[in-house]
C-alpha cells in the first residue's frame, strides 16, 4: 500500500508544471492579479539639423510641451514649410499639405537616396525623402 501511495505521489508530481511566477513588476488589481507595466524604450532626442540631398534639410526643435516638435523642412527644390510634430513612439508624426506623414528612424540605405547610403542616423518620411545627421556613417 505504501508503494502504491508513493507511486501516486511521484506520478502527480511528474504531471505538474513549474510553479507559477509570483514575482511582480506591476500593481496589484482589486481581484489580486498583477498589471504588468510595459517598459517603452527611452525616447531619442531628434532636435537638431538633419540633411538630405539636393538642398533637402530638416531642422527639428523642441516645442513647448514634451513630445512636441517644431519642424522646419525643405523637402524638395521647390517646397519648404514649418510643421508641428508629435512624438509617436520612436517616430514623429506631422501633417504636410493635409497629408499625415511620419518621420521614422532609419539608416541611410533605407532612405533610398544614394548620397545617404552608409549613414547610420537618419529619419525617413518615404523612399526618396530622408535626412541624416552630418558626420555619422559606418
Image (tube, rainbow, N blue to C red):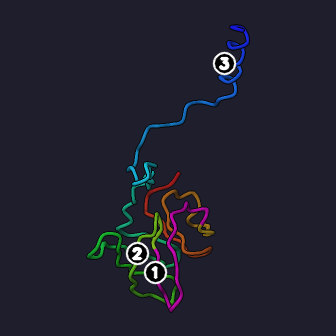
Sequence order check, earlier mark of 3 and 1: 3
Q: Which residues are magenta?
A: 93-110
Give the vertical position of 32 relative to 4 (above or below): below
For image coordinates 35% across by 67% down, the residue present is 47
- Find the distance from the CA under tag 3 to the CA under tag 2: 60 Å
Count of picture labels: 3
User: What element does badge 1 sit on?
Assistant: strand
Circle 3 sits on which residue? 9
Give the vertical position of 13 relative to 120 (above or below): above
Q: Position of residue 2 (x, y in %)?
A: 68, 8
Which residue appears farthest toward the top when viewing the image? 2
Magenta span: chief secondary structure: strand
Left or right of residue 123, residue 81 in this image? left
The answer to whether the residue labelled 2 contacts the one labelled 1, judged by CB atoms less than 8 Å apart, is yes
Q: In the image, which is nearer the foreground, mark 3 or mark 1? A: 3
Give the vertical position of 97 relative to 64 (above or below): below
Disc 1 packing (10 Å; few <14; some 14–19; many ≥20): some
Circle 1 sits on which residue? 94
The answer to whether the residue labelled 3 contacts the one labelled 1, judged by CB atoms less than 8 Å apart, is no
- Tell me if residue 71 is in the magenta stretch: no
For image coordinates 39% across by 79% down, the residue present is 71
Q: Position of residue 17 (x, y in %)?
A: 63, 31
Q: Nearer the viewer, residue 82 or 135?
A: 82
Q: Nearer the viewer, residue 38 or 113?
A: 38
Q: Nearer the viewer, residue 97 or 29?
A: 29
Q: Nearer the viewer, residue 63 or 25?
A: 25
Circle 2 sits on which residue? 86
User: What element does badge 2 sit on?
Assistant: strand
- Find the distance from the CA under tag 2 to the CA under tag 1: 7 Å
Amino acid at each position: 500500500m505504501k508503494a502504491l501511495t508513493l507511486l501516486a505521489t511521484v506520478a502527480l508530481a511528474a504531471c505538474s508544471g513549474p510553479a507559477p511566477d509570483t514575482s511582480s513588476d506591476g500593481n496589484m488589481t482589486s481581484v489580486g492579479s498583477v498589471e504588468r507595466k510595459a517598459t517603452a524604450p527611452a525616447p531619442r532626442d531628434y532636435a537638431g539639423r538633419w540633411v538630405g540631398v539636393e538642398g533637402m534639410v530638416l531642422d527639428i526643435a523642441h516645442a513647448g510641451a514634451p513630445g512636441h516638435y517644431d519642424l522646419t523642412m525643405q523637402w524638395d527644390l521647390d517646397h519648404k514649410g514649418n510643421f508641428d510634430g508629435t512624438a509617436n513612439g520612436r517616430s514623429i508624426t506631422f501633417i504636410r499639405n493635409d497629408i499625415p506623414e511620419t518621420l521614422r528612424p532609419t539608416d541611410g540605405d533605407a532612405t533610398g537616396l544614394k548620397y545617404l547610403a552608409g549613414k547610420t542616423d537618419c529619419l525617413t518620411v518615404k523612399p526618396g525623402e530622408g535626412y541624416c545627421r552630418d558626420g555619422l556613417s559606418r
